[in-house]
Image (cartoon, grey):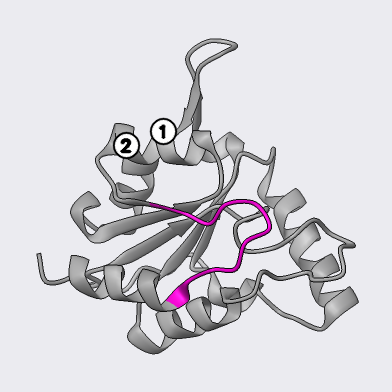
């Protein structure tokens, strides 16, 4: 899951909960448009990394395995790397924390200008703005406009 190919030009960084999946045990499981987005990235050779403020990769992986067990949908295969709070969340104070998205870009060897952050809440948006990375909000319980996101990723690669 951690291999990085040389010459990759684009990167999708996305939150998991309420962005790609609904709460474990919900009827929907995966948000409408999420599979199409992940498949589109796979077809284009765009790596997708998870950026979560969940405590550990093990916890995230367990949730993804539970989703597969209950719905038959395997999302793990789409993610190049999974980042948990332990890996990249910076806590400045009790009220101020953010995801270190530049760290992810450096680790993936992709310029920030070629990355897009997909998330559903303020921390995701603030982290993206702080890093100078375009942000796309999925909102809570809304479908994903995967065509628009893939177009933005395609446009970022030509910059």
Mark 2 secondary-structure assignment: helix
**Real-space CA distance between mark 2 and mark 1, rounded to the nearest whole angstrom:** 5 Å
Q: Are marks 2 and 1 in contact (CB under 8 Å)?
A: yes
Report crowding for label 2: few under 14, some 14 to 19, many 20 or more residues within 10 A (C-alpha). Answer: some
Mark 1 secondary-structure assignment: helix
Looking at the image, which residue is at 79% across and 59% down?
63
* Left or right of residue 148: residue 122: right
Magenta-highlighted residues: 136-146
* Residue occupying the far bottom of the picture: 43
Residue 93: horizontal and vertical position, in percent? Answer: 53, 10
* Left or right of residue 11: residue 38: right
For disc 2, the marked residue is 129
Residue 7 visible to an observer of this rendering: no
Report crowding for label 1: few under 14, some 14 to 19, many 20 or more residues within 10 A (C-alpha). Answer: some
Q: Is residue 37 above or below residue 79?
A: below
Residue 55: horizontal and vertical position, in percent? Answer: 69, 37
For disc 1, the marked residue is 126
Q: Quadrant of the C terminus?
A: bottom left
């Amino acid at each position: 899951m951690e291999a990085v190919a040389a010459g990759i030009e684009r990167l999708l960084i996305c939150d998991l909960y309420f962005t790609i999946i609904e709460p474990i045990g919900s009827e929907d499981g995966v948000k409408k448009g999420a599979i199409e987005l992940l498949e589109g990235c796979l077809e284009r050779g765009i790596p997708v990394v998870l950026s979560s403020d969940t405590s550990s990769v093990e916890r995230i992986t367990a949730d993804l395995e539970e989703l597969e067990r209950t719905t038959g949908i395997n999302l793990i295969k789409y993610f190049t790397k999974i980042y948990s709070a332990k890996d990249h969340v910076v806590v400045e104070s009790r009220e101020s924390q953010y995801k270190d998205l530049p760290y992810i870009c450096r680790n993936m060897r992709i310029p920030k200008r070629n990355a897009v952050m997909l998330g559903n809440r303020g921390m995701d948006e603030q982290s993206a703005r702080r890093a100078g990375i375009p942000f796309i909000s999925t909102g809570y319980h809304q479908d994903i406009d995967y065509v628009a996101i893939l177009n933005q990723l395609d446009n970022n690669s030509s910059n």
